[in-house]
Amino acid sequence: MFTETLLKTNNLTKYYSGFRALDNVNLEIGRGKIIGLLGPNGSGKTTLIKLINGLITPSSGEILVDGNNPGPYTKSIVSYLPDKNYFANWMKVQDVFNMFADFYGDFDMNKARDMCAMLNIRPEDRIKSMSKGTKEKVQLILCMSRNAQLYLLDEPIAGVDPAARDYILSTIINNYNEEGTVIISTHLISEIERVLDEVIFIQNGQVIRHDSVDDIKENEGKSIDEVFRESFRMVPYMNVNQEGVYRYDK
Amino acid sequence: MAWKLDDSRPIWPQLKEQLTMAIVSGQYPMGSPFPTVRDLAADAGVNRNTMQRALSELENDGLVITNRTAGRTVTTDKELIMKMKMETASTYIDEFVAQMNAIGFSTEEIIQVLKEKEAK
Amino acid sequence: MTSKLLKYELKSSYQYMLIVWAAMIVASIGISLTVGMQDSAMESTFITNLIYVIPYLLYFAAACALGVAMIFVIVIRFYKGLLGDEGYLMHTLPVREWQLVVSRALAATIYTVGSILVVFISIVPFLIAANGFSEFFSVIGEVLGSISFKIFIIIVEVLILVIFSVLKSVYQVYAALAIGQLVDKYRILLAVGAYIGISVALTIIASVGITLGDLILSDEFMSHWSINPFESQHEFFYFQILLFFAFVVTVAQVIVFHIVTERILTKKLNLL
């Protein structure tokens, strides 16, 4: 049986060469939700996702996915879309499909093939020779062709054009396992806020807000994008002196 | 369906309003099968939980009926649809009147203007 | 799971290895053919000289390519495959870290032992060209005929020892790379430092061991070692002890390096 809480972190802290990337993060995330992990660049989103995947280890604190520390079991129920291209030079599309089928019991090869066919990607295509955008789509297809419990999508829509954004978002919301939870990290909020059930705001490695989207909209009458902009407002340097008059320095 | 969603309000009530409109206006005829949550969510570009919530509300109102075998269908209750139509109409009228009042038309003048427009 | 990982790891470099191996053998055949041509006393012109030189250049190039291939298979496949961006795929597979490490170590060992074999095979055409076809095979036949059961045993044991030595060398690189990835900056520098450090430590341990062994072991033992070990029952026995000792030392290093690598990747993985 699965535990009711899918993901839990206890006082999770991570230092990178002296810099505190995550600071005492306590999260509890349930099942069957789409959750936005929102924060500016460098706020700790990727660090959190890498910790959940076991790609880095906590400086202190603990992570539990379905009650287990990151390890072979949690990896078998987590489907991860990194912000890196993880393919090796020798791989053809079919090689990675075979690899996923060999290692993940929840991988749906037919679904992956169909999704590739829709994009005119052939199984015998060599991944090395694909464009960056196509590689990213293949990674998305691999990620969403699994019937996982937890999907961790790190910046899936960063740096792509609006048409690709629509493709990526609809691929996510139409293909995830409904008993599972999807966590999408991004700093592009207006594009995805419509699909979210909950949001987690993260700033300087700290979780500053974790709420349901409906609650936020009902209580504040604003879009998540507006709330986000207000939470993370930065004061720009204006080169204005005390009297409010511009100085002209030569 | 053409969805118009405002991100500053919760999404599910907006979905409910627009689906109600679609039923009342006959876009989904009485007794006809109603699309699945999955299809509607994909069409609106929202997540399924949100669409599910809107549909549950429609079911509570009786506009959509869930059968064990046939899936969801639109109600065949004419009176209910008429009632919903009237409710929607009254919302529109209230809005319209409020706006007309705001630019200085009295209710009589509004009726006058409408009649003149109709005559043209 | 480990065998599946090994399958994909072998797949990652087999094309490159096969091409390099083939080039090596083709070049060596080329050399032996030109040696034959020289023997048939053709007039020495610029063109013929060129023809004589080309296979040697090819052989040299193939040998260099083999060296690069070995670095690729041993160092780069581990560094890029487990500690670089590919690590995002490999470390999220539902397998244990030891399986990832072992699959790479086995693939590297298979390719290294294969390369050693290919180098030996590539010498055969030289020998044939130098000695003539019939003489080469008669010598081979003689050698094979003279191999006693004891020598056969020793050859097999030495081969096994070679394989484990290759595995040990591979694992020493892995342990150094694993140590290097502990830091966020200057990872390669630390890995190189760790490799040198391990080598120095091993040399010190070995020289201490040899000195101690010298003190402990009797002169009688040493005197046996200095003469032909294949002659009598007695010497064979001593040689077995030596081989066994070398085997234990090598396997111990493999185990220690494996544990160091596996523990670091399990407890302190630090993908950038």
Image: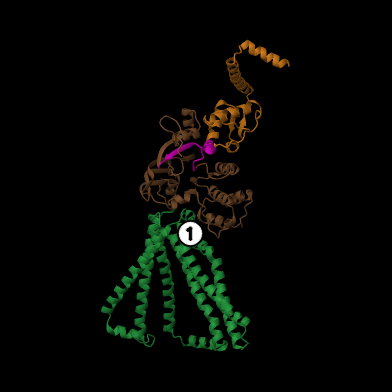
A169 within the magenta span: no
Quadrant location, the N terminus of chain A: top left
Chain C colour is green
Residue that lies at the very extreme toward the left in this rendered image:
C215
Q: Nearer the viewer, residue C41 or C112?
A: C41
Chain B colour is orange
Q: Is residue C168 left or right of residue C49?
A: left
The range drawn in magenta is: A181-204
Quarter residue A240 falls in: top left
Can residue A232 be seen?
A: no
A193 within the magenta span: yes
Can residue C197 be seen?
A: yes
Q: Position of residue C173 (x, y in %)?
A: 41, 65
Residue that lies at the very extreme toward the front in this rendered image:
A250
Q: Residues within 10 Å of mark 1 (few under 14, many from 20)?
A: many
Q: Is residue C170 left or right of residue B54?
A: left
Q: Position of residue C272 (x, y in %)?
A: 44, 53
SS type, badge 1 = helix
Amino acid type at circle 1 is Gly
Q: Position of residue A246 (x, y in %)?
A: 46, 33
Q: Position of residue A41 (x, y in %)?
A: 46, 43
**Mark 1 = which residue?**
C81
Measured along the vertical axis of the image, is residue A14 above or below residue C264?
Answer: above
Quarter residue C28 falls in: bottom right
Q: Chain of mark 1?
A: C
Q: Is residue C47 left or right of residue C153?
A: right
Chain A colour is brown
Measured along the vertical axis of the image, is residue A210 above or below residue C256?
Answer: above
Q: Nearer the viewer, residue A65 or B62?
A: A65
